[in-house]
Image: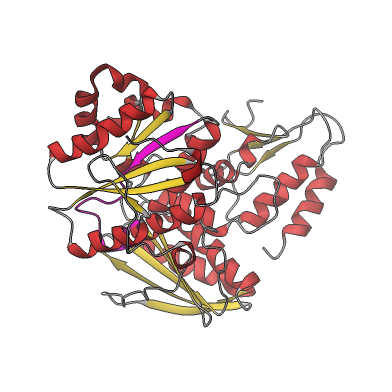
Amino acid sequence: MSASPASLGFQHRALFYSDWSEYVAGTVPFIRDGLASGEEVLVAVPVEKIALLRSALDQDADRVTFANMAEVGANPALIIPLWQQFLERHPGAVRGIGEPIWPGRSDDELRESQRHEALLNVAFGNGRPWSLLCPYDTRRLSNQVIDVAFQTHEYFEHRGKAPKSTWYRGLEDCTRLDTQPFSEPSAAVSHGEFESGSLWILRRNLADIARLAGMQNNRVDAFVFAVNEVATNSVVHGGGSGRYRTWVEDSNIVCEIRDLGRIVDPLVDRTRPREDADGPRGLWVANQLCDLVQIHSSAEETVVRLRMGLENKPRLSILESSEEKKFKDSDLN
Amino acid sequence: MSNCSAVEESLRVAFPTEGDPHFDVTNLSFCDISGIRALVDCARSLGPDRHLRLHGLPDQLATVMRATGWADLPCLVLCECEVGST
């Protein structure tokens, strides 16, 4: 009942559930249909859902690849590369379950997760056919989140069928980087300007602020590297100079880079560059190093906010994914 | 960003013409992507069956190498051994 015939292309479906039984009723038949058709199945959901699905699937669970979304998708920009990699590894039929939004995500993470859901359509909409089912907890998530889910998914799961969503935005609207201006910082900011010859001042100031706030040295180095790359983008592609603001907020350091350029590729920060390509890599690299990278880009300006927690966090990224153990359950503990 | 061409040229001159050059970057105070790219270009220019062996690469640079796929290039080796033990 949940087949994904080639004629349907990429099937991006929302699944709305209010309790465990609805969750299992929506996901398990989807998984079993895929297994019955010989498809490879990747389930990327929070770890407690993995335990639930393993139990419900019984022996079939051994034929499914699981990943803890709270780790692989802690930074939502890393999720599309995860799916891209899964598709590259399995040229035959595949399907997946991805749950990037759960209660407890911060406002900024939620915003980026919603952007991720929209960009999935851009990344895979014109590609090979496969199905991705995205569960949403209607009891614990806000109405706004559910409304946006109807806008970012072309289909939704309903009693084993996948009707079209009336509110789906469409591909073009999903590419927009100018939909939501950032909120103003809630803490005092340090700010300045930079150009090619003064990037070192930005790096020094940022490192001083981060260390003063208590950030561990290895994280300071990584954060400074990432911010420097985004600021370099401003120098090279954004008019030759830019402005920065940095502040400490909820045990995170935030640095905002602002310039007069415009980003036109909505996937620029989440498409892994080919190793032999000469194109810009700054935003991609920033996502590998930081906890969150947010972009707002319009005809007038581009603003990039980079966020890094003061403390180390457990994090699996796709960086190690060439190792098969990456996707196995042993990594979920 | 501003001096990577000079760095690349200096490395090309300094590297031996045979065998694998070893480059210790333990004391590097800062290097951006352009700098890493300069190292990658140097490695690529070494020719067949030669490798640039990098020692003491800071964690964030090793992460960048892996993120960009450069760590997988056959002409580049990220050495984890103690510097000087090779």
Closest to the observer, A275 or A43: A43
Quick check: A305 left or right of B61? Answer: left
Q: Tally the numbered discs.
A: 0
Quadrant in which residue A256 is drawn: bottom left
Q: Is residue A280 visible?
A: yes
Quick check: B49 left or right of A275? Answer: right
Percent position (x, y) of residue A105?
24, 55
Residue that protrudes farthest toward the top in the picture: A59
Q: Residue at x 35, y 26 (%)?
A: A64
The quarter of the rendered structure image containing the N terminus of chain A is: top left
Q: Is residue A156 above or below residue A175?
A: above
Let me know if residue A8 is in the magenta part: no
Q: Is residue A196 above or below residue A71?
A: below
Closest to the observer, B56 or A250: A250
Q: Is residue A308 visible?
A: no
Q: Residue at x 79, y 30 (%)?
A: B50
Residue that protrudes farthest toward the bottom in the picture: A300
Percent position (x, y) of residue B63?
52, 43
Q: Residue at x 46, y 38 (%)?
A: A5
The quarter of the rendered structure image containing the C terminus of chain A is: top left
Quick check: A286 left or right of A247? Answer: right
Closest to the observer, A212 or A168: A168
Q: Is residue A113 above or below residue B55?
A: below
Let me know if residue A105 is in the magenta part: yes
Closest to the observer, B21 or A332: A332
Residue that protrudes farthest toward the right in the picture: B17
Figure colour scheme? secondary structure
Task: Find the magenta span and give its range.
Answer: A93-113
Percent position (x, y) of residue A15?
26, 47
Percent position (x, y) of residue B9?
81, 53
